[in-house]
Amino acid sequence: METLIFQLQGTMAAWGEVAVGEYRPSADYPGQSAIDGLLAAALGIDRDDHAAHMALCNSYRIAIGVVSTGRLLRDYHTAQVPGRTDLKKRPHATRRDELSLPKQDLNTILSTRDYRQDASVLVAVQAYADAPYTLVQLAEALKKPRFILYLGRKSCPVAAPLHPCILDASTVATALSTYQQQLMALWQKTSVTPPAGNETIIQKIVWGDDFGTDDLATMGVLRDFSITRKDQLITRQGWLFADRSEHIALMKE
């Protein structure tokens, strides 16, 4: 089946998990909503266009090949914010508008935010028959994105070209492996030094229920375990997400 593969590499990434209180954790690889949001940014879809976001969410199935989970970085974060009552009384289209109050009327909030350093993943995307964009259109958008692409937070830009490529492979695992070989060949041609050690090997493959129940037929690997992740988009306007089953296969060297 035709599969769009692209890479995500960054000095820092933040793949948000459920945030409770002042702690903002990060998963070690992106979820479905993160990839849908990245595709939407590349296509130039506005965050408030709920219908377009839902069309992306419901028209493609996504798998992740985790090459490196990177290293955990924990940031003790402070920020100034106005009180809710003061904020309602004035328009605030920008951060500067928010902070236009006298200093004594601003509050300080504390939070702890997690990042992943030097993480690297491969993303596999397959389209349903009624998808609003072809895989070719998605690939072109990733090459020339309308909006700036970042890895979870605006402070986390991509550190390498996404190098989107469309492959026709029998399974997702085969497509990911073929793509990885092409990347290695590209590094050799451009004299770019590839990551050292096991960071060129896919450590695990992650996918959802939408790939079906026959793992070997669609994925080419068998799941080792499954988890529940709250990253199924309900609406971006209210930041509401539903639970989604995610299956993980640990790759043998």
Image (tube, rainbow, N blue to C red):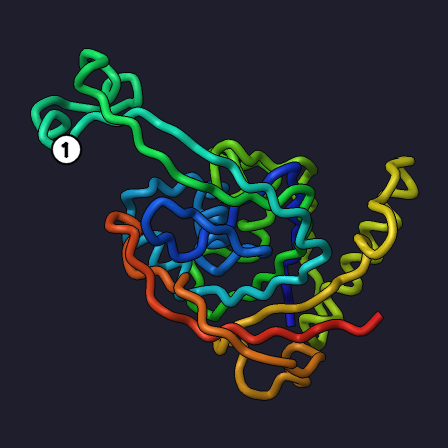
Q: Position of residue 90 (x, y in %)?
A: 11, 22
Amino acid under label 1?
Arg
Q: Position of residue 5 (x, y in %)?
A: 66, 57
Q: Position of residue 173 (x, y in %)?
A: 72, 71
Res. 141 visible in picture: no
Query: What's the residue at 66%, 68% (across, down)?
Result: 205
**Vertical comparison of 91 with 178: above or below:** above
**The N terminus appears in which quarter of the rendering?**
bottom right
- Left or right of residue 99, residue 3 in this image: right
| Quarter where residue 45 is shown | top left
**Vertical comparison of 173 with 38: above or below:** below
Pointer 1 residue:
84
Q: Residues within 10 Å of mark 1 (few under 14, many from 20)?
A: few
Query: What's the residue at 59%, 66% (across, down)?
Result: 63
Q: Position of residue 221 (x, y in %)?
A: 70, 80
User: Which residue occupies the foreground of this view, 204 or 122?
Assistant: 204
